[in-house]
Amino acid sequence: QVRLVESGGGLAQAGGSLRLSCAASGGPFSRYGMGWFRQAAGKEREFVGGISRSGSRIYYTDSVKGRFTMSRDNTQNTVYLQMNSLKPEDTAVYYCAAVSTFPSEYVYYEVAKYDYWGQGTQVTVSS
């Protein structure tokens, strides 16, 4: 059973930056592809970015390309989401998620593909 704990959310001004972290425990972290998702009030949860288990493949949704950077440290069992040039429309609860993909380096986009989820961290961007 993998446990995921997000941190780093908070309040930022438009144009500002935040860095989210997601610490994993309970499993061999390098076996898991990781995803960041977000859910704004009244909306469905959506894919933000995904990283393969070795970090060799990273994909982003179009709305965050060039602004957000996802990375992972398999020695620290942690995945990160660096968010720059934040916009009010980035306001949401952000979740990290994990799915075992070993030995593949596949990255899943779909919410339903992920088996483990964190509790979420609120990101609020003021204009």
Image: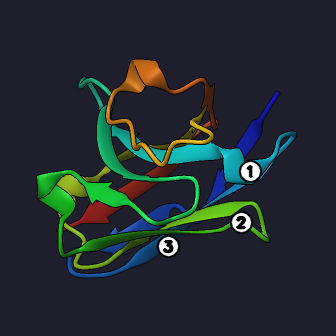
**Location of mark 2 (residue):** 74
**Location of mark 1 (residue):** 29
Please state if 38 lies on the left or on the right of 100 as rendered. left
Q: Residues within 10 Å of mark 1 (few under 14, many from 20)?
A: many
Front residue (pair 11, 103): 103
**Quadrant in which the C terminus is drawn:** bottom left
Please state if 59 lies on the left or on the right of 101 as rendered. left
Mark 2 and mark 1 in contact (Cβ < 8 Å)?
yes
Q: Residues within 10 Å of mark 2 (few under 14, many from 20)?
A: some
Residue depicted at x 51% and y 65%: 55
Sequence-earlier tag: 1 or 2: 1
Q: CA distance from mark 3 to mark 2?
A: 18 Å
Q: Residues within 10 Å of mark 3 (few under 14, many from 20)?
A: some
Residue depicted at x 30% and y 78%: 84
Name which quarter of the figure residue 45 lies in: top left
The colour style of the image is rainbow
Furthest-left residue in this view: 62
Residue depicted at x 78% and y 34%: 2
Instruction: Say if 16 sits above or below 43 in the image.
Output: below
The local secondary structure at tag 3 comes to: strand
Residue 40: in sight, yes or no?
A: no
Residue 66 lies, in percent from the top left, at 18, 75
**Quadrant in which the N terminus is drawn:** top right
